[in-house]
Image (cartoon, helix red, strand yellow):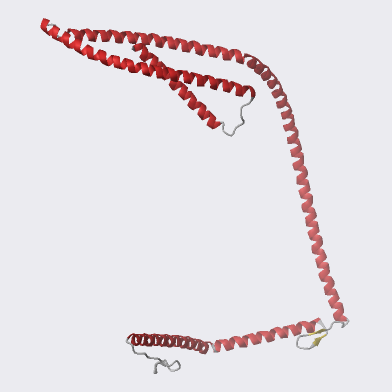
Amino acid sequence: KEQVQQRLALVRRDNATVAADLQGKAAQFEEVKGKPVLKGEEFRKYASELRGKTAQYKRMKQELAELRAEWGVLSRTQAILDAEAKKVSSFLGEAEARRGLSGYQDTQDELEKVSQQKAEVDEVKGKTLEEISHVVEEINGQIKARKNRLAPQIKDLRTLRVKFQEQESEYLEKKQRHDNTKAGLDTETAKLQAECDAAENEVSHEESTCHYYTSLHSIEQVKMERVQADRQQQFSRTMPDGTTVSSYVELYEAKLKQQDQAIKELRERQHSVQENREPNMKQVKLYKNLGKLLRCKQDMQKAARAELNQMAHENEQDTNVFTMPEEHGEPQGLD
């Protein structure tokens, strides 16, 4: 029976391993959805692994069914044997009581159980040490295999490292020369840019001065033309009031008179506004009060009309029909 239990535990463990492997494959399948399909050698390798896993799963499933059937038979046999053992134990207990040796069988059973447990512990220890040794050997073998597999790559890497160091030293040397050349060119460029900026500022200043003197020359030219026209009495202009002036003196005197007249009119308007301010303010206030009075009167008329309409509606409900004239519908005395 113990051998069957061990086989059952082993099969269950293998079954759990296969189920976990299947779950992992399912997860991998979910991850590779949408990715390129395996082709060629990779697909054949994957199909071979899948067929092997499927065959192993079916074989273990069949073994598990057989072990479950055997387990049922053994469980029934154990139940029968337990019943017989109880009868035998009862008979032995009576015999021990008759001979004055009560508890002898229980003590013997406990000693056998302790011995059996000790043997199981020793067996587990031996298996554990054996498994650890096997795992260590397997790990060492994997490390050695990986070292052997990586040896050519490590050799190539060393060669590439030497080439890299040579190229790196060459690169650093050329980079140093490039940086020195760039620094010199940057300094020369900055110097030339400063000289160019100074020349542009000087040109801008000279152009501004040239424009300034050109404008002064134009102004003086216009002044000279006016003076010559005034001296030759060729100047003539008609003012807004219809008068004609023949010199700039007369023109400016006429403009001064116009300004004086405008100032005089503005002062008169200001004086008139100041004098009429109080009466105008009173008149504005009266107009505002009149507006309030008219709105109040309108509100009162609306309220009276609504009250009359309410009374007429109440009279209609009492079967009394009353019609108000449209022209004389307002109550007298509200004005």
Residue 14 visible from this viewpoint:
no
Q: Position of residue 179 (x, y in %)?
A: 72, 32
For the N terminus, give its image quadrant.
top left
Left or right: where 4 falls relative to 172: left
Residue found at x 68% / y 19%? 160
* Residue 206 shows in the view: yes
Q: Residue furthest top?
A: 99
How far from the left and from the top, in percent, is residue 64? 41, 19
* Residue lying at 75% horizontally and 35% vertically, measured from the top left: 184
185 relative to 246, above or below:
above
Which quarter of the figure has residue 306?
Answer: bottom left
**On the image, which quarter does residue 226 sit in?**
bottom right
Q: Position of residue 253 (x, y in %)?
A: 75, 84
Residue 219: name its quadrant. bottom right
Closer to us: 237 or 155: 155
| Location of residue 299 in the rendering, given as x and y in whole percent from the top left corner | 42, 85
- Nearest the viewer among 201 and 13 is 13
